[in-house]
Image: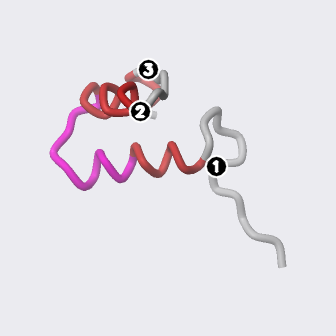
């Protein structure tokens, strides 16, 4: 049986997407806060990308 790939057509790897979602849902952060935290980890992402 094939495993479903929920992030198949996205620009960033699933690990980065899941990290951003986890940070946003776990802590009371704004989209800009998530962008700043990802930037500290070397991931260059725009706030509108995090919003989507």
The reply, left or right, for residue 17 in relation to residue 38 is right
The reply, left or right, for residue 39 in relation to residue 15 is left
The location of residue 50, given as percent across then percent down, is 42, 32
Residue 7 is tagged as 1
Quarter of the image with the N terminus is bottom right
The location of residue 47, given as percent across then percent down, is 38, 23
Q: CA distance from mark 1 to mark 3?
A: 18 Å
- Look at the image and say whether residue 4 sits in the magenta stretch: no
Secondary structure under the numbered disc 3 in the rendered image: loop
Image point 46% across, 27% down: which residue?
Answer: 42
Is residue 26 shown above or below 40? below
Say which of 6 and 20 sits in front. Answer: 20
Dominant secondary structure, magenta: helix
Image point 35% across, 53% down: which residue?
Answer: 22
Q: CA distance from mark 2 to mark 1?
A: 21 Å
Q: Residues in magenta?
A: 21-31
Q: Badge 2 is on which residue?
A: 41
- Look at the image and say whether residue 27 sits in the magenta stretch: yes
């Amino acid at each position: 049986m094939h495993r479903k790939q929920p992030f198949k057509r996205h620009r960033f790897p699933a690990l980065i997407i899941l990290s951003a979602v986890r940070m946003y849902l776990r802590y009371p952060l704004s989209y800009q806060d998530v962008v700043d935290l990802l930037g500290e980890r070397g991931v260059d992402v725009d706030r509108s990308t995090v919003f989507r």
